[in-house]
Image (cartoon, rainbow, N blue to C red):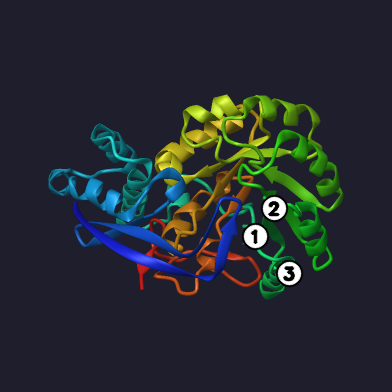
Amino acid sequence: MELRLLEYQLELKHTFTIARESTDIQDTLIVELSLDGHHGYGEATSNPYYGITIEGMKSELLELQEALLEYSFEDPEQFYLWLEQFKLSSFALCALDLAAYDLWGKIHQKPLYELWGTTLDQIPTTNFTIGIDTIDKMKAKLKEQPWPIYKIKLGTDKDVEIVKSLREETDAIFRVDANCAWTAQQCIDYSKELKDLGVQFIEQPLKADNWEGMQQLKEHSQLPIIADESCIVESDVVKCAPYFDGINIKLTKCGGITPAKRMISQAKSLGLKVMIGCMTESTVGISAIAQLLPYLDYVDMDGALLLAKDIAKGVYIDSNAVIHYPKLGGSGVALL
């Protein structure tokens, strides 16, 4: 297989702020794997919280260039087993894994969900994320993008006030994500009011390793709690099970589709709800997430919708939140 790396700066429509950081530009790395005239694409974004840079990923991946030329590709799962010997970061591994799945599906001329024996009869609708801002600007963003489900980023000194103000504008489903910014008592206190305001669940309210606090939430929160920063890799699923009602899997953090599918199976066997989230990827990464929708209870795949300009075409989400799949096999990705 031939390897090609493409670096992009994805400009966002609006400054995107969560409890710990703000960004206007998302750096991303596209991996292209080519074989016999077929081209598969994967993606991983940079992430300062996890110490991931574009240069770091490029350095890792370029060291594989010679080995990839000699590798005899048959299917993504065998490819993943082969890759494990190189001890790549999960982000670089994800980009390769996504590219391999896209390539595999294109070789077989079928979308991934079909190759896995699933259908699109019942798939969740993605939420649209409203980043932290002034209340007036958050209201304006909500009005700019009418949507059936919103994820509201919180972690301020007026979080309940924000949700109350946004509720005046819409009867859509709300989800809230505090990105580790609250204490256990704050979350317990907020949960009653947030439930009354039509919030569906709270995502990662406490610091990732605050297990004592998670236990308090399990006993006293009036809303379900979904793990994100506490659930990064496969071994975290069983660890999270006693404390959370569900998990949010990020492909970049766990290492791609291959481990994500195992995490989904394990979570369901433990009675957990399953969500997959995005890391402000372009349509390349979003199209890969879309193939997993038949397995999911919830999804946060609005990354491409937050961009001022996309770099690829593939799975498309229209203004009514309806998801459209291309006829092209694999993840259905083609670079613009």
- The answer to which of 6 and 80 lies nearer the viewer is 6
Q: Amino acid at mark 3?
A: Lys
Query: Above or below — where is 192 with respect to 39?
Result: above
The answer to whether residue 146 is left or right of residue 287 is: right
Mark 2 / mark 1, whichever is N-terminal: 1
Bin the neighbour count of mark 2 within 10 Å (Cα to Cα): few under 14, some 14-19, many 20 and up.
some
Q: Amino acid at mark 1?
A: Ile
| Discs 2/1, front | 2
Mark 3 / mark 1, whichever is N-terminal: 1
Q: Which residue is rendered at x = 82% and y = 52% of the image?
A: 198
- The answer to which of 92 and 293 lies nearer the viewer is 92
Bin the neighbour count of mark 1 within 10 Å (Cα to Cα): few under 14, some 14-19, many 20 and up.
many
Q: Quadrant of the C terminus?
A: bottom left
What residue did someone put label 1 on?
Answer: 132
The reply to whether dot 2 and dot 1 touch (C-beta < 8 Å) is yes
Coordinates of residue 21 in the picture (x, y in percent): 54, 54
Numbered badge on residue 45: none
Q: Secondary structure at mark 3?
A: helix
Q: Which residue is rendered at x = 39% and y = 70% of the image?
A: 311
* Residue 164 visible in the displayed image: yes
* Residue 171 visible in the displayed image: no
Coordinates of residue 15 in the picture (x, y in percent): 55, 67
What residue did someone put label 2 on?
Answer: 156
Residue at the extreme front of the image, as rendered: 157
The answer to whether residue 72 is left or right of residue 304 is: left
Numbered badge on residue 139: 3
C-alpha span from label 2 to label 1: 8 Å
Q: In which quadrant of the rendered view does residue 267 lie?
A: top right
Q: Amino acid at mark 2?
A: Thr
